[in-house]
Amino acid sequence: MKRISLLLITLILTGSFVFAQVDQGTKFLYYQRYQSAEDAFRKALASDPNNDAANYWLGQVMISTKDSAAAKTLYEQYLAKNANSPFTLIGMGEIELMENKTNEARQRFETAISLTRGRNVDVFNAIARANINATYGDAKYAIETINAIPKRRRRDQKNAESYLLLGRANRKLINGGDAVLAFRQALSLDPKLAAAKYEIGKVYLTQNNPDYFLPNFQEAITLDPNFAPAYYELFFYWFNKDINKARDYFDKYLAVSDRDLSSEYDKTSIIYASKDFNTAIDSAKAKIDRLKEKADPRYYKLVAYSYDELKDSVNAKDYLEQYFAKQDTAALVSQDYVFRGKLLSKFDGNETEAMKSYEKAVDLDTSKTGRLELMHTAADMAAKSNDFQMQANWLQRIYDSTAEPSNRDLFDLGYATYQAKNYQAADSIFCGQYTVKYPTEIFGYLWCARSAGAQDTTMEKGIAVEPYKKLIAFARAAGERENYKSTLIQAHGYLASYYANVAKDKDSAVIYLENILKLDPDNESAKQYITIMTQPDKPATTSKATKRSKQKQPANRKKRSR
């Protein structure tokens, strides 16, 4: 009996220790203290190698630190011994989602629900988490999974996590309003949940709205001074705006986070932000030399930015290309491609690659304002390269993406299309859209006529005649004869030429030439052509050969009368 009692006490103590370690590990993971979380989960597994939760969470740490290969190995080895482990099945399903094996992943999720008879809230949360985190995850399925949790269970303070996940799933679907509602519901269950305020801030961050995201990050810190992610976001925001503020937030971040290689990189980046570019280059290169292949790829990017600030585009381009070669594609951000496009555009022959970089930057930018700014930058760069068709393509995307495009937006699109010599499309824009939307402006009528004229350079089709007549009618009706003088002269000249050379209607041609003289009495060309066209036609002259022919012909003889 003593041995049995001792065994029970040992099992209880071991179970309590493992539970405490797992609980501590999930708290560290909540604060994004990944090394501390990993240590806690490994200690739990050392005491209980078959602890499903500890194994699952250890894999989650590996995924969070971009080591999905290690997580896959961990889950595979565990499933080989515990094939019906619900949480490890979900973890393996998340790996499969990352590999775009969506059907296999869904089967694992459904099996985990079946094994727990659909009663374990943590299982539902884990499935939602997998579909939110993985690139190929289904955010709609994540929402359905959370909604499958009985409402009475979701109202429990312990399950505020479910509403955090519900909010993140909606954010992945770019449903900002529903995301914020879910995060606020999480706060109503746990008023001290700093992560909920932080996540609300992240919603407004994707909208590039500092008036809302900054207060939410600040409130997250107020709710929980140990919440490291909020300090880091504030450090990152102030990095290029106020380096002193940024440094202060970074120091506070370091005080409540685990020291890792990423923190070492951020220290070096502060040197760059302080505009000590040579020191930043030396420091980053020293880290690269010491850490070799383990060096954070961002050191190469930092060196590239520093060289760019020093006007050394050659070295900047070299180090940026090394950064792109070494960095995980999934870790590349929109601004990386913007910088690459900017650098490539400085070297002849790289225009196409530069444009591809801007395309990628636009695709990755989740902020509508940011996307529009990038598209404008790309359009400007295309114009500088005289690639007017590419400029027109970007301007079309800008026009389509703008809720209320202006007359300038439409004009720029039409003009770039005209410069690209796509005259039929330009005709459609100016004649079919601009004159309709902005009938009181001359630009639509003017470029409508020019686009039509460019399609018919010989004037034989006469397709520009009516547009030029409408241009003249508009200018006359506007009553701004002096302002439109040169435009009217050009229009009358075009019509005079058409009627003289194509329609063979001299009277009409003279009328348009006379209109030119009314605008410009000293216009010598108009006078000259009027003189030519108003001269009477010369009588046909008889040639000498014709005269001789007539003389040789016998005279008509009179018929004899009977």
Image: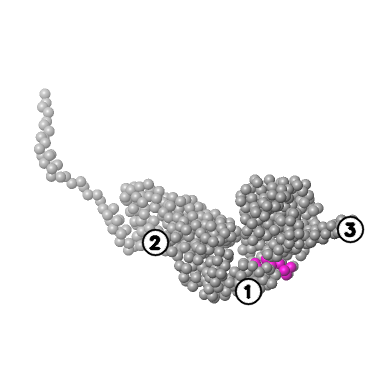
Q: Are marks 3 and 2 in contact (CB under 8 Å)?
A: no
Tell me, yes or no, if residue 225 can be seen here.
yes
Q: Is residue 186 visible?
A: no
Q: Could you tell me what secondary structure mostly forms the magenta stretch?
A: helix
Q: Is residue 206 left or right of residue 422?
A: right
Q: Which residue is mark 1?
A: 247
Q: Nearer the viewer, residue 494 or 263?
A: 263
Callout 2: few (<14), some (14-19), or many (20+) C-alpha neighbours within 10 Å?
Answer: some
Under tag 3, what secondary structure?
Answer: helix
Where does the C terminus fall, quadrant-wise? top left
Question: How many neighbours does mark 3 have within 10 angstroms: few (below 14), some (14-19), or many (20 or more)?
Answer: few
Please, what secondary structure does the residue beneath circle 1 have?
A: helix
Write down the region rendered in magenta. 224-233
Q: Amino acid at mark 3?
A: Lys
The residue carrying mark 3 is: 2
Q: Any magenta on residue 265?
A: no
